[in-house]
Amino acid sequence: MIELDDTHDPARTSWVEAANDPASDFPIQNLPFGVFSAAGHDARCGVAIGDQILDIRACADLGFFEGEAAKAAEATKASNLNGLMALDLRFAGALRRVVADLLDAKAGHAAHDHRDSILYPMRDCTLHLPTAIGDYTDFYAGIYHAIAAGALMLPDNPLPVNYKWVPIAYHGRASSVQVSGAPVRRPLGQFMRAKEEMPHFGPSERLDIELEMGFFIGKGNKLGEPVRIENAAEHIFGFCLLNDWSARDIQRWEMFPLGPFLGKNFGTTVSPWVVTAHALAPFRVPAMKRPSEDPKPLPYLSSATDQQAGGLNVDLEVRLSTAQMRQAGEQSQTVITSSSRYLYWTPAQMVAHHASGGCNLVSGDLIGTGTISGPDQAQLSSLLELTSGSKPFAIGEGEQRIFLEDGDQVTFRGRCRREGFRELGFGVCTGEIIPAHHGE
Amino acid sequence: MIELDDTHDPARTSWVEAANDPASDFPIQNLPFGVFSAAGHDARCGVAIGDQILDIRACADLGFFEGEAAKAAEATKASNLNGLMALDLRFAGALRRVVADLLDAKAGHAAHDHRDSILYPMRDCTLHLPTAIGDYTDFYAGIYHAIAAGALMLPDNPLPVNYKWVPIAYHGRASSVQVSGAPVRRPLGQFMRAKEEMPHFGPSERLDIELEMGFFIGKGNKLGEPVRIENAAEHIFGFCLLNDWSARDIQRWEMFPLGPFLGKNFGTTVSPWVVTAHALAPFRVPAMKRPSEDPKPLPYLSSATDQQAGGLNVDLEVRLSTAQMRQAGEQSQTVITSSSRYLYWTPAQMVAHHASGGCNLVSGDLIGTGTISGPDQAQLSSLLELTSGSKPFAIGEGEQRIFLEDGDQVTFRGRCRREGFRELGFGVCTGEIIPAHHGE
């Protein structure tokens, strides 16, 4: 596990003023990595600080890095973070420590003197996917989601018999992962409508969200060589928010027996900033407590360290804004709140399981946790669960929703809170539903 | 559909003598593309001819190409075929026509004069994956496989209710796709043994093959923009053989409700040569005839041209060689024969379905057809089906198999035969099972 150090000191402030606003997701204690382009520049790697982006390459050109930090900066020369992720975690840790010093209100004079050539206002930049995603895997580790979703199919026995033994997952579609802000086109597809005798093809009528966290693989493993649970955390570079948009009607009709396909692969949205394992060190918590009647994880998924500190404490929120609300000048409304604490399997268990048969994980790969519902009604983290697919909830002035309508904007936020530490966040993971493609 | 032209003329021969052997998979009428490296060279794109590989770059450097063929050759400059596949099919068609002329026994004097600088003996080369595979999707289009596999679960109602409406598929693992010849490590995994009460973790005890064909996406489509069935064939660059190695015990325990994951992602093997849509033009056949009681495909999957000529006629064969057989100097034995005619859905229907919801297919993506079993016992194209998971078959001198043992080598071959045309083939798709990783 990553040790706390002075990068986690809540007393530190930055000469980038906006980073010191308690509401900012990107204080000097965070420093997430991302990929951005400013006007006239190719995409390059940067670090979020308050409302600004620090250009790593520009800092390297000024000679601000040496040793491990310099090697880390060198690895960000491409237009994605795959190279940095491929290094041992300590390299990104070293880079983050130096960046903290550069941006420090007290220590960062040298960088401050060059602020015009190393900082870009975030609002003037385009943000890109953090990595070239080789493979994207989606787990099903939110047990309250599995219970709530399962209950809609099998009310008496909602949880699959393998659930408490196997960190269930499926392969998702890498090509259609998009960065926050990209519109999401309502998919056409084939599905069975209630009481009809043959399937219908047309725009999905049950378009949904799934509130998840994502994480990026750091070091990979060779094909045929499992990752031991004790070492799994070293393969996790950092985290983001992830919306696993889902067309429930398409998914339901297609998914037996081989799982979800077109019901999911029309688009997945991730937040642009990768909050590092280093920044999250203060917010590690014990794995979700298993009821005593639950089986113990098998040895290949079992590590005392992981059980003690392999969980993650991120408060999650989903806000919805409809086209009508925006026209009326209304703010978006919170429709779901949840927490990453409700994951039955830890990220390290997901990695160890994923690689247990020898599957090679590759630096920059994206892993989704699965929908993170909590035990309460307001914590049900998809509309399918919230509405049971039939009971509408009220939104805005006189509107209601069971599933998403065109023009709906869905925004996820995540925030880490712990007494004695500076709060930090993930930025937004947002997308707007645009109408289905016309015709077939 | 691609028109027949003089590249399909069975009377043509090559100055590469081995290509004229009737048993060769790579006569001048085939000319599949692949990626190879010869001693001292980086990986580069080539064309198989008899027992040789033609170096496309070397031919380009000699000025052998112009116009569309030159543009196609230019697109092969990288160490994979993705660039060539991204072009309209006619560019690869033009390149193939010029290559046929270069290698022609009568017309190919210019190339023959340079044979030492443009040809490499295949046995001296390392073959690589043809493309950088962004995403790998596996369909389930072999209806006799779906029936036989389904019958092991639900004897009275083996075929899923959606089967005749939906070309069922799932996302596979791209990172663990390997080229023919790479060893396949027996996966460790979690599974329920018969009559045990909790799952076991260890080497798979039910390791299997699946006989499939694969195809590579040529031109891609933009996210959110479906591909019409009428245009789908233009997105298919060419075909290969594909072994979807499967650990039945792991798969069975993990796959409810989200489909196969670790039961498949420890490795998938493809043959190295991409037999182009152009070379296969004479071997197109009508789509599999649907019994009159079956539903008609929905309009987005329905095209008269595709029904008339969207099928593919490739004879398929699986050979098995055990370590004991090789020690005794025995030849491998044929254990399965089948045909790509037994696909309920055509490749074009797979493409149109895959993109129907807007999922973006990318040049170089790999699509598997699903296991292609036929109606007869000897055509059951996985060991699970052949043995029902319990009835051994005899192999070699006194050996028997239900599933694969360490040291077993499995080799797929595919061959196109039609009266009045030169036979052509796919080369081999082979892999040997090596023992599981020790420990956990």
Image: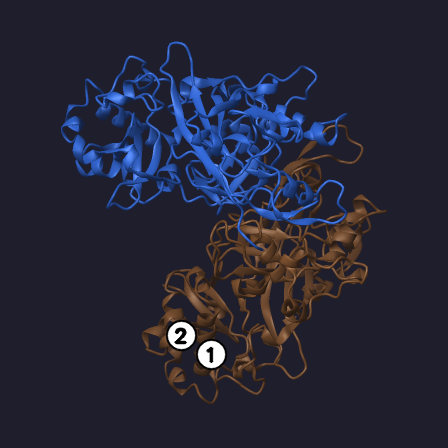
Chain colours: A brown, B blue
- C-alpha separation, residue under disc 2 versus residue under disc 1: 8 Å
Q: Amino acid at mark 1?
A: Arg
Q: Residue at x 52, y 39 (%)?
A: B406
Few, some or many residues within 10 Å of mark 2 (<14, 14–19, 20+):
many
Q: Of A356 and A266, which appears nearest the observer?
A: A356
Q: Position of residue B7 (x, y in %)?
A: 31, 20
Q: Which numbered disc covers residue B375?
A: none
In the picture, residue B54 is in which quadrant? top left
Secondary structure type for disc 1 = helix
Closer to the chain start, of discs 2 and 1, is 2
Query: For mark 2, what is the residue?
Result: A69
Q: Chain of mark 2?
A: A
Q: Which numbered disc covers residue A97?
A: 1
Q: Residue at x 68, y 49 (%)?
A: B200
Q: Chain of mark 1?
A: A
Outermost residue to the right: A156
Q: Position of residue A159 (x, y in %)?
A: 78, 50
| B380 w.r.t. A18: above or below | above
Few, some or many residues within 10 Å of mark 1 (<14, 14–19, 20+):
some
